Amino acid sequence: MPPCLPILDEKGRPKLRDSYLLDTLECGESSFAMACLIANRKYGKNGGREDVKTHHYIVSFDPKDAVENGLTMERAQALGLQFCKDNFPGHPAIVCTHPDGHNSAGNIHVHIVIGSLRVRTVERQPFMDKPCDWEAGKKHRCTSSMLRHLRIAVMEMCEQADLNQIDLLEAQGDHVSEREYWAQRRGQRRLDHANAKLAAEGQQPTQTIYQTELDKLRKQIYSVLNKTTTFEEFSALLMQEHGLAIAVAGVLTAVLCPIFAALL
């Protein structure tokens, strides 16, 4: 989600774009600003100058989508509205689409600005891990796990809409290749199908999240990295806790050593 600079007039002052679409969510009959102000007063939060009062996210589509895949401003706005509903439920929001970035690249942008306070309690979603992620009066948490979820959500949105996309996970240094990402998606679909059959038979699934072997290995490595400071300690603890050995040559070396070196 790259930055998008404002359009300026001849005196260097921000000005409105010639074309844009704008909608609000969770604001009722109020403007976005008033909805945020009402929420802040109701819950007694965001009174300090240093408080984070809003969060701004940008979805920037590939310039080729307009020509190759029929992406219009109206379609992009609809995608942005649904993305906001799915990922920021309960937050007052502005969703605004314009047809070009500041550098005239021709890529349609969707700006999503949410009030930091949630105004209603929402149903818990899989990406929410703490009560503050769904309860009214709590603030949005822009954590690394949330950002990773949003990157995946953008990739899935583009896939479902038959739009171009880039590998947002690899680009952000998550050590997850596009090949592994799609392998996880396919595995999750197979697991969901199998679990649906079990549920229909009155059985309780034992696993709900599919994990690739590489992801299992990655998490084992990270768990040991957090406890060690030298390669020797890392190697010994990896064997002790997970039964994994690092050979001088072989597959393990090729997988483990680059990851270890990148994180030191």
Image (cartoon, grey):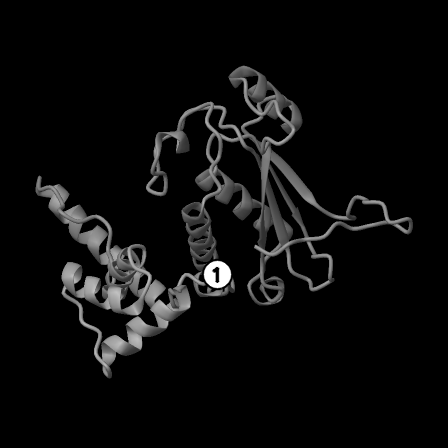
Residue 36: name its quadrant.
Answer: top right
Of the pair 112 and 174, the residue shown nearer to us: 174
Of the pair 80 and 90, the residue shown nearer to us: 90
Q: Position of residue 127 (x, y in %)?
A: 36, 43
Residue 226: name its quadrant.
Answer: bottom left
With 101 as the anchor, is 257 left or right in this view?
Answer: left
Q: Residue furthest bottom?
A: 249
- Which three-letter amino acid code belongs to the residue tagged 1? Gln
Q: Position of residue 64 (x, y in %)?
A: 60, 67
With 263 as the anchor, is 95 left or right in this view?
Answer: right
Q: Residue at x 62, y 32 (%)?
A: 50
| Circle 1: element type | loop
Residue holding disc 1: 172
Q: Is residue 167 above or below residue 208?
A: below
Q: Position of residue 133 (x, y in %)?
A: 40, 33
Residue 128: name its quadrant.
Answer: top left
Q: Residue at x 48, y 53 (%)?
A: 154
Q: Residue furthest right?
A: 11
Quadrant that contains the N terminus: bottom right
Q: Residue at x 68, y 53 (%)?
A: 4
Q: Is residue 186 above or below residue 34?
A: below
Residue neighbourhood size for the residue with mark 1, other residues' Cα within 10 Å, grouped as few (<14), some (14–19), many (≥20): few
Q: Position of residue 27 (x, y in %)?
A: 58, 26
With 65 as the anchor, is 228 left or right in this view?
Answer: left
Count of all numbered marks drawn on residues in the image: 1
Of the pair 10 and 190, the residue shown nearer to us: 10
Quadrant that contains the C terminus: bottom left
Q: Residue at x 23, y 68 (%)?
A: 235
